[in-house]
Amino acid sequence: MSSPLLDVWEAAAASPYHPAVGKDAQFTLGFVLLLISLVLVTVFSLNRSFVNLPLLGVPGSLAFGFGSVFMICAAGVYV
Amino acid sequence: MRSFSLFSSCVIALSSFAVAELNLSQPLVSKQVLSSAFTPPQVFKNANLVRNTNLDKAYPRETINVVIENIDSKPQSEYYLPFESGLISRIGGLEVKDKKAAEKGNFKVETVGFGTESSTSTEFYLIHLPIPLAPKEQQTLTITYSVLSAIAPIPAQIAQSAKQYVQYTFSAYTPSAYVTEKQKTKLKFPNAEVPDYTTLPADLNADKKADPQKQGSTFTYGPYNDIPAGAEQFVSVRYEFTKPLTHASMLERDLEVSHWGGNLASEERYWLSNQGASLKNHFSRVEWQKQSYMNPPTSALKALNFALHPGAVDPYFTDDIGNVSTSRFRPGKREASLELKPRYPVFGSWKYSFRVGWNADLSSYLRKLTKGDSYVLKVPFLEGPRIAEGISYARVNVRVVLPEGATNVNYWTSVPLVDSTTGIHKTFMDTVGRTTLTLNAINLSDEFRDRDLIVTYDYPYTAGLRKPVVITLGMFAVFATAWVVGNLDISIGKKKKTT
């Protein structure tokens, strides 16, 4: 039996979806990113200056944001 | 406050079961309403009709092959199929095909009914022929459906290890809205043990032979000639069926797509009951245990075997109490077999509700379209246990939870649906909620296993970044707050002047 959507599925046979980070690498990447953010937070807490806010705060927040998404996935809650 | 939130979450968790229990009433079938004086126009006749009733499973499966002929002077495309109003709500998976061109797919079928329930006892399925049938032309239709909750155990109470007998009552004349020139009904029993059946007088039979004709485990009622529209002749058959009559009053199936995790999470929640004969005496654990080594046929539901797609991982099987440890999981290349044993053998009139779930790699179910940020997802509409005697579902709710920010959702499935909605489901780490496609079907059976459901949706790259960006902004707010609070001067006394 054929339908337009079935044809769409067949047409896309060459491009199965693979995430940027595979299931096996989620924990490692999440852990490393969270560790980086911890280090940056620690350094920032030692010297809370206005210059350090973008210098350490932005990369620290980004590392925490992406790291926590990967860590949550690695823990089995697939967000 | 904490205890209140704990209490409320418990109430919510329990209410999901309670709410499902209430859903056992008559299913809501969408239908076209006709005036109560309606009778189908006599524009067709059934030149020849053969009905095969298969009683191998816990629900009768009917296959009607009928040669229809247009006896009107104009081309006609609307063929009515009548059912009693009590019966129509238990008819499941009705599909109509052209017998000679089955590959062309199913015809459009809809339910039509009357304004008030009490005014009549007949309701119709309306079959739309894709090409109107010209006058005096003939076409062969194959109509298949199953009748749920149609088999009743007689006697209604049996001993724990006794044989179970069930009764099926139906009309020997296939219900039709048109004159049927020639027809017969073939019944296929699971075995040759049929102690009771209705015998019809030989004068009704076109061949003037004893009715029914028996041949091993197959009975034939008919042939009958020139049966008028709406004629019925009820007969009953009672046969041995020492197997559970497994019926799910409700099945909720969730499919959760995670692009970040590259995962498809499936969860199924079942509310099962065994419609077989109930126990005459108390359940005897000793007798059950003694018997279990010999593995005799039993009317109790002992095990459920889920044949999952290869690549399924992390299965779980829980019920109201918690994890059920009597399960085995065997991952394999062809299929991943998940064998579940309920906490207790489910005897007739007993119930068991549980949930089962597993994960799988998204790459075998999701493909990205070449142009744009569109994706196509292909998943089985129903997976469910594979058991020889079959399982029927009164109500199936399939929910496809797409990632947050997915838009333009379209779907296709060959399963007959009663309702579909697109909404929002809020769960872990969501800000606006995930786009959810909910599909409802009624009266399905395990024959619909592995029918495909295809969903397409648009999911821009930026929408995928919503989750990490929200967490990033939250974390940056913490940094900024720490800086602001750290720079507040909260010292007592005069501020020292820095030089």
Image: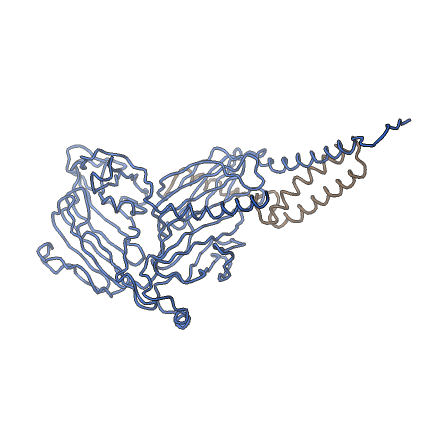
Chain colours: A brown, B blue
Image height check: is B147 above or below B342?
above
The image quarter containing residue B276 is bottom left
The quarter in which the C terminus of chain B is drawn is top right
Q: Residue at x 14, y 49 (%)?
A: B182
Residue B15 image point, x, y percent:
46, 46
Residue B55 image point, x, y percent:
28, 57
- In the picture as drawn, the residue positioned furthest to the right comes out as B499
Query: Which of these two is toward me, B199 or B300?
Result: B300
- Residue B450 in view in this figure: yes
Q: Is residue A30 left or right of residue B98?
A: right
Query: Which of these two is toward me, B188 or B282?
Result: B282
The quarter in which the N terminus of chain B is drawn is top right
Number of numbered discs overlaid on the protein picture: 0
Q: Is residue B334 left or right of residue B110?
A: right
Residue B253 image point, x, y percent:
45, 47
Image height check: is B309 above or below B402?
below
- Residue B363 in view in this figure: no
Residue B225 image point, x, y percent:
12, 50
Query: Which of these two is toward me, B52 or B340?
Result: B340
Q: Residue at x 66, y 45 (%)?
A: A30
Q: Is residue A67 left or right of residue B17?
A: right
